[in-house]
Structure formats: C-alpha cells, structure tokens
Amino acid sequence: MPDTDLRDRVAVITGASSGIGAAIARSFAGSGIKTVLAARSAEKLDRVAGEIKAMGASTRTGRSALSRPSAASPPGSTSTAMILVPDA
C-alpha cells in the first residue's frame, strides 16, 4: 500500500504569491507539508510566507519560477520525496 501521509514532505509551489498557488501553499502548510514557495513578486510572496509561518508551518521562498524540483532546497528536511506544483 502506498504511503499517502504527506506530513513532513516538501512541496515546491511556483506562482505561490497569489491565487491558486497561494491557496495551495496555505492548504499544504495547514496539512503539515513543508513548503518551498516561488514567484516573481517578492512582496506578495513574503506576505504568503508570513501567513504560513504564522500557522507554525515551515516554509522557504525564492523569487523566481522553478523549472525543476532540484532548484529548491527543502526546509529542514533530508527527505528526497517532494511534491512539485507548477502553478505559473
């Protein structure tokens, strides 16, 4: 049976500064998934990251669009299991 528990996994989410990307980031963080957020707008991205940190969740940010999961380093995790959500 596959492991469906995503807590402590890492999700790399592009387009995370607004809209669907931000909603996915908040939802994942609320479920215990660590997030790496990327977007072009640093100000908006920092706002979303602040909301996630206020929830007590782990997150990192990067101002760019990611083309591959290896471009992001998981926050506080040695796990290689990642979830890539290319929203933008």
Image (cartoon, rainbow, N blue to C red):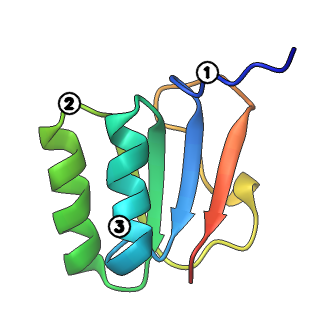
Q: Is residue 18 above or below residue 28?
A: below
Mark closer to the chain start, 2 or 3: 3
- Check disc 3 and give the amino acid type: Ala
Pinpoint residue 88: horizontal percent, then vertical percent.
56, 84
Tell me: 70 left or right of 34. Answer: right
Residue 63 lies in quadrant: bottom left
Q: Is residue 38 above or below residue 82?
A: below
Q: Is residue 40 above or below residue 67?
A: below
From this viewpoint, is residue 61 visible?
Answer: no
User: Which residue lies at the image location 57% right of the left edge and 38% below the top edge?
Assistant: 10
Residue underneath mark 3: 22
Report helix, strand or loop for mark 2.
loop
Report helix, strand or loop for mark 1.
loop
Measure how far apart labels 2 and 3 are at the Cα level: 16 Å
Quadrant in which the N terminus is drawn: top right
Tell me: 15 left or right of 86. Answer: left
Residue underneath mark 1: 5
Mark closer to the chain start, 1 or 3: 1
Mark 1: give few (<14), some (14-19) or many (20+) Cα within 10 Å.
few
Mark 2: give few (<14), some (14-19) or many (20+) Cα within 10 Å.
few
From this viewpoint, is residue 11 visible?
Answer: yes
Residue underneath mark 2: 56
Residue lying farthest to the right in this orientation? 1
| Front one among 21 and 50 | 21
- Check disc 2 and give the amino acid type: Gly
In this rendering, the label closer to the viewer, 2 or 3: 3
Measure how far apart labels 1 and 3 are at the Cα level: 22 Å
- Check disc 1 and give the amino acid type: Asp
Mark closer to the chain start, 1 or 2: 1
